[in-house]
Image (cartoon, rainbow, N blue to C red):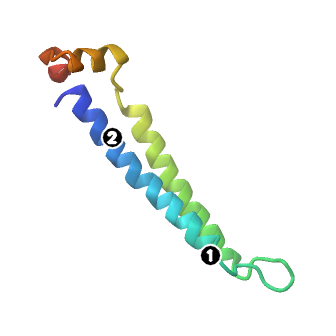
Amino acid sequence: MSKITKAADATDQNQDHVGVAIDRLQRGFNGRIVNGYGIYSDPSMRRSDLIEAQKAVEAALSVMRSTAWPSNAEYDALDQGSDEAVSSP
């Protein structure tokens, strides 16, 4: 699998992880989550939403750190039709 293909796969994985984090934050912190006293009506659910969002962000960061991202030169070589950039480890 080429570096470009691996980076594209990593990008897809990250988009999935980030989507989970955004979903948990939007769902958990949208609407009427505060009672009449200005306090979370269900703080344990807010905590759970934050923990799940944090796990998704950590997973995304792990993918980012473990991916060998292509350089501009590799993109340029691919644009010029070089098979070398496509078949690099």
Instruction: Check the picture and name the quadrant holding the N terminus.
Output: top left
Query: For residue 40, what is the image quadrant?
Result: bottom right
Mark 1 touches mark 2? (CB < 8 Å):
no
Q: Nearer the viewer, residue 56 or 12?
A: 12
Question: Compared with residue 38, is residue 48 higher up or lower down, i.e. above or below?
Answer: above
- The image shows residue 88 at horizontal and vertical percentages of 19, 19
- The image shows residue 21 at horizontal and vertical percentages of 51, 58
- The image shows residue 6 at horizontal and vertical percentages of 25, 34
**Residue under label 1:** 45
For the point 50% across and 55% down, the residue is 55
Viewer-nearest of discs 1 and 2: 2
Q: What residue type is disc 1 on? A: Met
**Label drawn at residue 65:** none
Q: Which SS class for mark 1? A: helix
For the point 36% across and 17% down, the residue is 72
Crowd tier of the residue under label 1, counting other residues whose Cα lies within 10 Å: few below 14, some 14–19, many 20 or above: some
Single out the residue that lies furthest toward the bottom: 36
Single out the residue that lies furthest toward the right: 37
Query: For residue 37, what is the image quadrant?
Result: bottom right
Q: Nearer the viewer, residue 58 or 28?
A: 28
- Left or right: residue 55 versus residue 42 is left
- Left or right: residue 52 versus residue 46 is left
- The image shows residue 24 at horizontal and vertical percentages of 53, 66
**Label drawn at residue 10:** 2
Which numbered disc flags the more N-terminal residue, 1 or 2? 2
Q: What residue type is disc 2 on? A: Ala
Crowd tier of the residue under label 2, counting other residues whose Cα lies within 10 Å: few below 14, some 14–19, many 20 or above: some
For the point 70% across and 79% down, the residue is 33
- Left or right: residue 88 versus residue 47 is left
